[in-house]
Image (cartoon, rainbow, N blue to C red):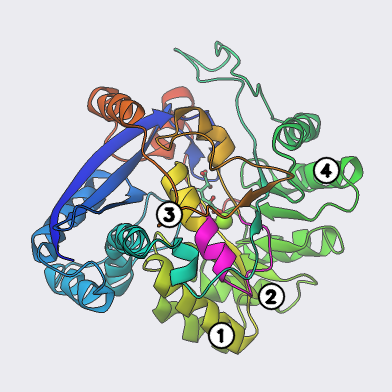
Amino acid sequence: MKITEIVLTPVAFRDPPLLNSAGVHEPWALRTIVEIHTDEGISGVGETYGDVAHIERLQQVIPSLIGLDAFALGPMHQCVAAALEGVTGFDTHGLTGKFSAPGTIDRVYSPFEVACLDIQGKAIGRPVVDLLGGAVRTEIPYSAYLFYKWAGHPTSKLGDEQPDQWGAALDPAGVVAQAKQLIDEYGFKSIKLKGGVFPPEQEIEAIKALREAFPGTPLRLDPNAAWTPETGIKVAQELDGIVEYLEDPSPEIEGMAEVAKVAPMPLATNMCVVSFEHLAPSVAQNAVQVILSDHHYWGGLTRSAKLAAICETFGIGLSMHSNSHLGISLAAMTHLAAATPNLTYACDTHYPWNAADDVVKPGVLSFKDGSLTVPSGPGLGIELDRDVLARLAENYRTCGILKRDDTSYMQKFNPEYEKRRPRW
Ligand code: GKR
Ligand code: MG
Protein backbone atom coordinates (compact mmCIF):
# COMPACT_ATOMS: atom_id res chain seq x y z
CA MET A 1 0.00 0.00 0.00
CA LYS A 2 1.97 2.97 -1.30
CA ILE A 3 1.85 6.52 0.04
CA THR A 4 0.81 8.77 -2.85
CA GLU A 5 0.21 12.14 -1.20
CA ILE A 6 0.73 13.92 2.13
CA VAL A 7 -1.26 17.05 2.94
CA LEU A 8 -0.37 19.39 5.81
CA THR A 9 -3.05 21.76 7.09
CA PRO A 10 -1.87 24.24 9.74
CA VAL A 11 -4.77 25.26 11.99
CA ALA A 12 -5.44 27.77 14.76
CA PHE A 13 -8.07 27.40 17.47
CA ARG A 14 -9.23 29.55 20.37
CA ASP A 15 -7.20 29.24 23.56
CA PRO A 16 -7.92 30.86 26.94
CA PRO A 17 -5.31 32.98 28.81
CA LEU A 18 -3.71 30.10 30.72
CA LEU A 19 -0.71 31.12 32.83
CA ASN A 20 2.54 29.22 33.24
CA SER A 21 6.19 29.83 34.12
CA ALA A 22 6.92 31.21 30.63
CA GLY A 23 4.02 33.69 30.41
CA VAL A 24 0.46 33.24 29.21
CA HIS A 25 -1.26 31.44 26.34
CA GLU A 26 -2.08 33.61 23.34
CA PRO A 27 -5.67 33.78 22.03
CA TRP A 28 -4.86 31.22 19.33
CA ALA A 29 -3.12 27.85 19.68
CA LEU A 30 -1.51 26.28 16.60
CA ARG A 31 -1.44 22.69 15.37
CA THR A 32 -0.84 20.94 12.07
CA ILE A 33 -3.19 18.27 10.74
CA VAL A 34 -1.38 15.66 8.64
CA GLU A 35 -3.28 13.56 6.09
CA ILE A 36 -1.65 10.66 4.26
CA HIS A 37 -3.29 9.18 1.15
CA THR A 38 -2.44 5.81 -0.42
CA ASP A 39 -2.80 4.13 -3.81
CA GLU A 40 -5.47 1.83 -2.34
CA GLY A 41 -7.76 4.74 -1.52
CA ILE A 42 -7.22 4.46 2.25
CA SER A 43 -6.18 7.63 4.09
CA GLY A 44 -4.99 8.32 7.62
CA VAL A 45 -4.61 11.36 9.91
CA GLY A 46 -2.11 12.63 12.44
CA GLU A 47 -1.77 15.83 14.50
CA THR A 48 1.35 17.69 15.52
CA TYR A 49 2.74 21.11 16.53
CA GLY A 50 1.95 24.15 14.41
CA ASP A 51 5.03 26.31 14.89
CA VAL A 52 6.45 27.44 11.57
CA ALA A 53 9.90 25.88 12.11
CA HIS A 54 8.24 22.52 12.74
CA ILE A 55 6.06 22.82 9.63
CA GLU A 56 9.20 23.50 7.59
CA ARG A 57 10.76 20.31 8.93
CA LEU A 58 7.63 18.33 8.08
CA GLN A 59 7.69 19.74 4.55
CA GLN A 60 11.36 18.92 4.23
CA VAL A 61 10.81 15.19 4.78
CA ILE A 62 7.59 14.69 2.78
CA PRO A 63 9.25 14.05 -0.64
CA SER A 64 11.21 11.12 0.82
CA LEU A 65 8.04 9.50 2.19
CA ILE A 66 6.10 9.44 -1.08
CA GLY A 67 6.14 5.91 -2.52
CA LEU A 68 6.87 4.22 0.84
CA ASP A 69 4.66 1.38 2.01
CA ALA A 70 2.28 2.63 4.74
CA PHE A 71 3.23 -0.48 6.78
CA ALA A 72 6.98 0.26 6.56
CA LEU A 73 7.42 2.26 9.77
CA GLY A 74 11.08 1.33 10.31
CA PRO A 75 12.12 2.52 6.83
CA MET A 76 9.95 5.60 7.32
CA HIS A 77 11.87 6.55 10.47
CA GLN A 78 15.13 6.08 8.53
CA CYS A 79 13.84 8.27 5.68
CA VAL A 80 12.92 11.04 8.12
CA ALA A 81 16.38 10.80 9.72
CA ALA A 82 18.09 10.95 6.31
CA ALA A 83 15.98 13.91 5.16
CA LEU A 84 16.84 15.82 8.32
CA GLU A 85 20.54 15.00 8.24
CA GLY A 86 22.58 17.93 9.48
CA VAL A 87 19.59 19.53 11.18
CA THR A 88 20.43 20.43 14.75
CA GLY A 89 17.86 20.37 17.50
CA PHE A 90 15.59 23.25 18.34
CA ASP A 91 13.61 24.26 21.35
CA THR A 92 9.99 23.34 21.41
CA HIS A 93 7.93 26.40 22.23
CA GLY A 94 9.81 27.18 25.37
CA LEU A 95 8.14 24.83 27.80
CA THR A 96 9.53 21.38 27.20
CA GLY A 97 13.21 20.56 26.94
CA LYS A 98 15.81 21.10 24.27
CA PHE A 99 15.55 18.73 21.36
CA SER A 100 18.79 17.33 20.00
CA ALA A 101 18.96 16.04 16.42
CA PRO A 102 17.68 12.53 17.42
CA GLY A 103 14.84 14.12 19.40
CA THR A 104 13.95 16.29 16.42
CA ILE A 105 13.75 13.24 14.15
CA ASP A 106 11.26 11.57 16.52
CA ARG A 107 9.22 14.75 16.73
CA VAL A 108 8.97 15.10 12.95
CA TYR A 109 8.36 11.39 12.38
CA SER A 110 5.51 11.13 14.92
CA PRO A 111 2.48 12.49 12.98
CA PHE A 112 3.40 10.47 9.88
CA GLU A 113 3.64 7.31 12.01
CA VAL A 114 0.24 7.97 13.62
CA ALA A 115 -1.37 8.58 10.22
CA CYS A 116 0.15 5.31 8.92
CA LEU A 117 -1.17 3.39 11.93
CA ASP A 118 -4.59 4.89 11.16
CA ILE A 119 -4.23 3.58 7.59
CA GLN A 120 -3.03 0.14 8.73
CA GLY A 121 -5.94 -0.22 11.13
CA LYS A 122 -8.42 0.79 8.44
CA ALA A 123 -6.82 -1.66 6.00
CA ILE A 124 -7.28 -4.64 8.32
CA GLY A 125 -10.46 -3.43 10.00
CA ARG A 126 -8.95 -3.18 13.51
CA PRO A 127 -8.45 -0.26 15.94
CA VAL A 128 -4.94 1.15 16.39
CA VAL A 129 -4.81 -0.23 19.94
CA ASP A 130 -4.75 -3.74 18.41
CA LEU A 131 -1.69 -2.82 16.34
CA LEU A 132 0.05 -1.82 19.58
CA GLY A 133 -0.50 -5.17 21.25
CA GLY A 134 -4.16 -4.96 22.24
CA ALA A 135 -6.08 -3.18 24.96
CA VAL A 136 -5.00 -3.90 28.54
CA ARG A 137 -7.71 -1.42 29.57
CA THR A 138 -10.63 0.03 27.65
CA GLU A 139 -11.40 3.04 29.85
CA ILE A 140 -8.59 5.59 29.94
CA PRO A 141 -8.59 7.98 32.92
CA TYR A 142 -7.54 11.60 32.32
CA SER A 143 -6.79 14.26 34.94
CA ALA A 144 -8.45 17.65 35.43
CA TYR A 145 -5.70 19.97 34.20
CA LEU A 146 -6.07 23.22 36.16
CA PHE A 147 -4.38 26.47 35.21
CA TYR A 148 -4.10 29.81 36.91
CA LYS A 149 -5.79 32.07 34.42
CA TRP A 150 -7.01 35.56 33.76
CA ALA A 151 -10.77 36.04 33.46
CA GLY A 152 -10.40 36.41 29.70
CA HIS A 153 -7.95 37.78 27.13
CA PRO A 154 -7.30 41.50 27.70
CA THR A 155 -8.31 43.68 24.77
CA SER A 156 -5.86 46.50 25.44
CA LYS A 157 -4.65 46.33 29.03
CA LEU A 158 -4.75 43.99 31.99
CA GLY A 159 -7.96 44.49 33.88
CA ASP A 160 -10.22 45.12 30.89
CA GLU A 161 -10.77 41.45 30.01
CA GLN A 162 -14.26 40.08 29.37
CA PRO A 163 -14.66 36.88 31.40
CA ASP A 164 -14.76 33.67 29.35
CA GLN A 165 -16.75 30.58 30.37
CA TRP A 166 -14.21 29.64 33.08
CA GLY A 167 -13.50 33.07 34.55
CA ALA A 168 -10.42 33.97 36.59
CA ALA A 169 -8.38 31.59 38.74
CA LEU A 170 -5.71 33.58 40.53
CA ASP A 171 -5.90 32.32 44.10
CA PRO A 172 -6.75 29.10 45.99
CA ALA A 173 -10.50 29.78 45.87
CA GLY A 174 -10.37 30.37 42.09
CA VAL A 175 -8.36 27.17 41.58
CA VAL A 176 -10.84 25.13 43.63
CA ALA A 177 -13.77 26.66 41.70
CA GLN A 178 -12.11 25.76 38.40
CA ALA A 179 -11.54 22.20 39.59
CA LYS A 180 -15.21 21.92 40.53
CA GLN A 181 -16.26 23.19 37.12
CA LEU A 182 -14.05 20.71 35.25
CA ILE A 183 -14.97 17.80 37.51
CA ASP A 184 -18.70 18.57 37.26
CA GLU A 185 -18.49 18.58 33.49
CA TYR A 186 -16.05 15.73 32.85
CA GLY A 187 -16.00 13.65 36.05
CA PHE A 188 -12.19 13.69 36.40
CA LYS A 189 -10.82 11.67 39.31
CA SER A 190 -7.28 13.15 39.46
CA ILE A 191 -6.16 16.77 39.48
CA LYS A 192 -3.06 18.50 38.14
CA LEU A 193 -2.30 22.17 38.80
CA LYS A 194 0.01 24.03 36.46
CA GLY A 195 2.17 26.12 38.76
CA GLY A 196 5.28 28.26 38.38
CA VAL A 197 3.10 31.37 38.21
CA PHE A 198 3.01 32.67 41.79
CA PRO A 199 5.57 32.35 44.60
CA PRO A 200 5.69 28.74 45.78
CA GLU A 201 3.99 29.47 49.14
CA GLN A 202 0.83 30.57 47.27
CA GLU A 203 0.85 27.47 45.07
CA ILE A 204 1.30 25.23 48.13
CA GLU A 205 -1.78 26.95 49.60
CA ALA A 206 -3.73 26.22 46.41
CA ILE A 207 -2.76 22.54 46.57
CA LYS A 208 -3.77 22.38 50.23
CA ALA A 209 -7.11 23.99 49.33
CA LEU A 210 -7.61 21.35 46.64
CA ARG A 211 -6.76 18.62 49.14
CA GLU A 212 -9.41 19.95 51.50
CA ALA A 213 -12.04 20.34 48.76
CA PHE A 214 -11.31 16.95 47.15
CA PRO A 215 -10.16 14.55 49.87
CA GLY A 216 -8.73 11.35 48.44
CA THR A 217 -8.33 12.70 44.88
CA PRO A 218 -4.75 12.26 43.59
CA LEU A 219 -3.10 15.69 43.12
CA ARG A 220 -0.06 16.90 41.17
CA LEU A 221 1.73 20.23 40.90
CA ASP A 222 3.89 21.23 37.90
CA PRO A 223 5.79 24.55 38.05
CA ASN A 224 7.76 23.86 34.84
CA ALA A 225 11.19 24.20 36.48
CA ALA A 226 10.42 27.53 38.13
CA TRP A 227 12.22 26.66 41.37
CA THR A 228 15.86 26.27 42.35
CA PRO A 229 16.67 22.82 43.77
CA GLU A 230 16.69 24.40 47.25
CA THR A 231 13.15 25.73 46.78
CA GLY A 232 12.09 22.46 45.14
CA ILE A 233 13.23 20.56 48.24
CA LYS A 234 11.29 22.90 50.55
CA VAL A 235 8.10 22.56 48.49
CA ALA A 236 8.51 18.79 48.31
CA GLN A 237 8.77 18.62 52.10
CA GLU A 238 5.69 20.85 52.51
CA LEU A 239 3.66 18.66 50.18
CA ASP A 240 4.68 15.34 51.73
CA GLY A 241 1.65 13.04 51.68
CA ILE A 242 -0.39 15.54 49.64
CA VAL A 243 0.71 15.07 46.00
CA GLU A 244 1.14 11.76 44.19
CA TYR A 245 4.10 13.27 42.31
CA LEU A 246 5.81 16.61 41.91
CA GLU A 247 6.42 17.47 38.26
CA ASP A 248 9.52 19.33 37.07
CA PRO A 249 10.21 21.35 40.22
CA SER A 250 13.70 22.36 38.98
CA PRO A 251 15.60 22.60 35.70
CA GLU A 252 17.73 19.90 34.09
CA ILE A 253 18.58 16.34 35.11
CA GLU A 254 21.13 17.57 37.68
CA GLY A 255 18.64 19.92 39.37
CA MET A 256 15.98 17.21 39.50
CA ALA A 257 18.50 14.73 40.91
CA GLU A 258 19.32 17.14 43.73
CA VAL A 259 15.64 17.50 44.66
CA ALA A 260 15.01 13.77 44.24
CA LYS A 261 17.63 12.89 46.88
CA VAL A 262 15.43 14.46 49.55
CA ALA A 263 11.90 14.61 48.13
CA PRO A 264 9.50 12.25 49.90
CA MET A 265 7.38 11.77 46.76
CA PRO A 266 8.32 10.68 43.20
CA LEU A 267 9.48 13.43 40.83
CA ALA A 268 8.03 13.45 37.32
CA THR A 269 9.20 15.15 34.14
CA ASN A 270 8.30 16.18 30.64
CA MET A 271 11.18 18.67 30.52
CA CYS A 272 14.51 17.07 31.35
CA VAL A 273 13.94 13.59 29.88
CA VAL A 274 12.43 14.22 26.48
CA SER A 275 14.29 11.83 24.21
CA PHE A 276 15.97 8.44 24.38
CA GLU A 277 19.46 9.85 24.92
CA HIS A 278 18.33 11.50 28.19
CA LEU A 279 17.36 8.19 29.76
CA ALA A 280 20.83 6.88 30.66
CA PRO A 281 22.02 10.00 32.53
CA SER A 282 18.68 10.34 34.27
CA VAL A 283 18.69 6.70 35.41
CA ALA A 284 22.32 7.01 36.53
CA GLN A 285 21.42 9.94 38.80
CA ASN A 286 17.94 8.69 39.77
CA ALA A 287 16.75 12.15 38.71
CA VAL A 288 13.13 11.24 38.00
CA GLN A 289 10.86 8.47 39.14
CA VAL A 290 8.02 9.12 36.67
CA ILE A 291 8.32 10.04 32.98
CA LEU A 292 5.47 11.77 31.23
CA SER A 293 5.46 10.16 27.81
CA ASP A 294 4.19 12.10 24.83
CA HIS A 295 3.94 10.45 21.44
CA HIS A 296 4.34 13.83 19.70
CA TYR A 297 8.01 13.93 20.65
CA TRP A 298 8.88 10.34 21.60
CA GLY A 299 8.50 9.22 17.98
CA GLY A 300 4.84 8.25 17.68
CA LEU A 301 2.96 5.41 19.29
CA THR A 302 5.32 2.51 18.54
CA ARG A 303 8.40 4.31 19.87
CA SER A 304 6.40 5.44 22.93
CA ALA A 305 5.82 1.74 23.56
CA LYS A 306 9.63 1.34 23.58
CA LEU A 307 9.87 4.12 26.14
CA ALA A 308 7.30 2.26 28.26
CA ALA A 309 9.44 -0.90 28.11
CA ILE A 310 12.54 1.03 29.19
CA CYS A 311 10.61 2.57 32.10
CA GLU A 312 9.44 -0.88 33.13
CA THR A 313 13.02 -2.18 33.01
CA PHE A 314 14.30 0.54 35.31
CA GLY A 315 11.27 0.70 37.61
CA ILE A 316 10.34 4.20 36.42
CA GLY A 317 6.65 5.15 36.55
CA LEU A 318 4.84 6.34 33.44
CA SER A 319 2.31 9.12 33.01
CA MET A 320 1.30 11.13 29.91
CA HIS A 321 1.99 14.76 28.99
CA SER A 322 -0.11 17.12 26.91
CA ASN A 323 -0.01 20.49 25.21
CA SER A 324 -2.93 22.40 23.66
CA HIS A 325 -4.34 19.84 21.22
CA LEU A 326 -7.35 18.61 19.27
CA GLY A 327 -9.17 15.28 19.01
CA ILE A 328 -6.80 13.49 16.62
CA SER A 329 -4.09 13.70 19.28
CA LEU A 330 -6.58 12.74 21.98
CA ALA A 331 -7.61 9.63 20.04
CA ALA A 332 -3.95 8.65 19.49
CA MET A 333 -3.15 9.22 23.20
CA THR A 334 -6.13 7.07 24.17
CA HIS A 335 -5.12 4.14 21.92
CA LEU A 336 -1.56 4.32 23.28
CA ALA A 337 -2.71 4.49 26.90
CA ALA A 338 -5.05 1.54 26.33
CA ALA A 339 -2.14 -0.61 25.09
CA THR A 340 0.44 0.40 27.73
CA PRO A 341 0.20 -1.77 30.87
CA ASN A 342 2.59 0.30 33.01
CA LEU A 343 0.87 3.62 32.30
CA THR A 344 -0.72 3.68 35.72
CA TYR A 345 -1.35 7.41 36.21
CA ALA A 346 -4.29 9.34 34.76
CA CYS A 347 -3.13 11.07 31.55
CA ASP A 348 -2.89 14.84 31.18
CA THR A 349 -5.02 16.55 28.59
CA HIS A 350 -5.65 20.18 27.64
CA TYR A 351 -8.72 19.02 25.70
CA PRO A 352 -11.42 20.73 27.84
CA TRP A 353 -9.78 24.11 27.14
CA ASN A 354 -9.99 23.65 23.38
CA ALA A 355 -12.81 21.14 22.85
CA ALA A 356 -15.15 23.74 21.33
CA ASP A 357 -12.99 23.86 18.19
CA ASP A 358 -12.36 20.16 17.64
CA VAL A 359 -11.74 18.92 14.08
CA VAL A 360 -13.03 15.46 15.02
CA LYS A 361 -16.73 14.76 14.54
CA PRO A 362 -18.47 14.52 17.92
CA GLY A 363 -19.52 11.26 19.54
CA VAL A 364 -16.44 9.09 19.85
CA LEU A 365 -14.38 11.23 22.23
CA SER A 366 -16.78 11.88 25.06
CA PHE A 367 -15.66 11.74 28.66
CA LYS A 368 -17.53 9.71 31.23
CA ASP A 369 -16.40 9.71 34.87
CA GLY A 370 -13.15 11.37 33.76
CA SER A 371 -12.31 8.60 31.29
CA LEU A 372 -12.50 8.00 27.56
CA THR A 373 -13.45 4.66 26.07
CA VAL A 374 -10.86 3.58 23.53
CA PRO A 375 -12.43 4.11 20.08
CA SER A 376 -13.44 0.76 18.58
CA GLY A 377 -13.69 1.71 14.90
CA PRO A 378 -10.90 0.84 12.42
CA GLY A 379 -7.68 2.84 12.73
CA LEU A 380 -7.93 5.76 15.15
CA GLY A 381 -11.71 5.34 14.96
CA ILE A 382 -12.41 9.02 14.35
CA GLU A 383 -13.68 11.10 11.44
CA LEU A 384 -12.46 14.55 10.41
CA ASP A 385 -15.05 17.34 10.29
CA ARG A 386 -14.07 19.05 7.03
CA ASP A 387 -16.08 22.20 7.77
CA VAL A 388 -14.33 22.74 11.08
CA LEU A 389 -10.97 21.94 9.50
CA ALA A 390 -11.57 24.64 6.85
CA ARG A 391 -12.61 27.16 9.53
CA LEU A 392 -9.50 26.45 11.66
CA ALA A 393 -7.25 26.63 8.58
CA GLU A 394 -8.73 30.05 7.84
CA ASN A 395 -8.06 31.08 11.47
CA TYR A 396 -4.43 30.07 10.95
CA ARG A 397 -4.17 32.25 7.84
CA THR A 398 -5.63 35.30 9.57
CA CYS A 399 -4.52 35.04 13.23
CA GLY A 400 -1.02 36.37 12.60
CA ILE A 401 0.66 33.90 14.95
CA LEU A 402 3.42 31.73 13.52
CA LYS A 403 4.86 30.24 16.67
CA ARG A 404 3.81 29.88 20.25
CA ASP A 405 5.27 32.69 22.33
CA ASP A 406 3.76 32.89 25.81
CA THR A 407 6.47 35.27 27.01
CA SER A 408 6.01 38.03 24.41
CA TYR A 409 2.24 37.87 24.84
CA MET A 410 2.65 38.35 28.61
CA GLN A 411 5.04 41.27 27.98
CA LYS A 412 2.34 43.03 25.94
CA PHE A 413 0.42 43.54 29.16
CA ASN A 414 3.29 43.50 31.63
CA PRO A 415 6.40 44.97 29.94
CA GLU A 416 8.59 44.19 32.97
CA TYR A 417 7.87 40.48 32.73
CA GLU A 418 10.92 38.29 32.13
CA LYS A 419 11.02 34.55 31.54
CA ARG A 420 13.27 33.12 34.24
CA ARG A 421 13.83 29.51 35.14
CA PRO A 422 14.33 29.09 38.00
CA ARG A 423 12.51 32.19 39.24
CA TRP A 424 12.21 31.35 42.95
O1 GKR B 1 0.04 24.61 28.17
O2 GKR B 1 1.01 26.09 29.42
C1 GKR B 1 0.87 24.94 29.03
C2 GKR B 1 1.70 23.84 29.65
O3 GKR B 1 2.59 24.38 30.58
C3 GKR B 1 2.42 23.01 28.59
O4 GKR B 1 3.02 23.81 27.63
C4 GKR B 1 3.42 22.07 29.18
O5 GKR B 1 4.25 21.55 28.18
O6 GKR B 1 1.51 20.79 29.95
C5 GKR B 1 2.85 20.86 29.84
C6 GKR B 1 3.58 20.35 31.02
O7 GKR B 1 3.10 19.44 31.67
O8 GKR B 1 4.68 20.81 31.32
MG1 MG C 1 4.86 19.19 32.90
Q: Nearer the viewer, mark 2 or mark 4?
A: 4
Q: Nearer the viewer, mark 3 or mark 2?
A: 3
As rendered, which of 76 and 258 lies closer to the eye?
76
First in residue order: circle 4 vs circle 1: 4
**Mark 1 burial class by Cα count in 10 Å: few <14, some 14-19, many 20+:** some
Q: Which residue is mark 1?
A: 283
Tell me whether circle 1 and circle 3 mark residues in contact (CB < 8 Å).
no
As rendered, which of 193 and 415 lies closer to the eye?
193
First in residue order: circle 3 vs circle 4: 4
Q: Which residue is mark 2?
A: 260
Q: Residue at x 29, y 74 (%)?
A: 102
Q: Amino acid at mark 1?
A: Val
Q: Amino acid at mark 3?
A: Leu
Q: Which mark is residue 380?
A: 3
Q: CA distance from mark 4 to mark 1?
A: 32 Å
Q: Residue at x 75, y 51 (%)?
A: 190
Span colored in magenta:
334-347
Q: Of helix, strand and loop, which one carries label 2?
A: helix
First in residue order: circle 1 vs circle 3: 1
Q: Nearer the viewer, mark 1 or mark 3?
A: 3
**Mark 2 burial class by Cα count in 10 Å: few <14, some 14-19, many 20+:** many
First in residue order: circle 1 vs circle 2: 2
First in residue order: circle 2 vs circle 4: 4
Q: Residue at x 34, y 42 (%)?
A: 31
**Mark 4 burial class by Cα count in 10 Å: few <14, some 14-19, many 20+:** many
> Where's the N terminus, which quadrant?
bottom left
Tell me whether circle 3 and circle 4 mark residues in contact (CB < 8 Å).
no
* Residue 172 seen in this snapshot: yes
Q: Residue at x 31, y 64 (%)?
A: 113
Pinpoint residue 189: horizontal percent, then vertical percent.
Answer: 77, 49
Pinpoint residue 109: horizontal percent, then vertical percent.
Answer: 28, 64
Q: Which residue is mark 4?
A: 210
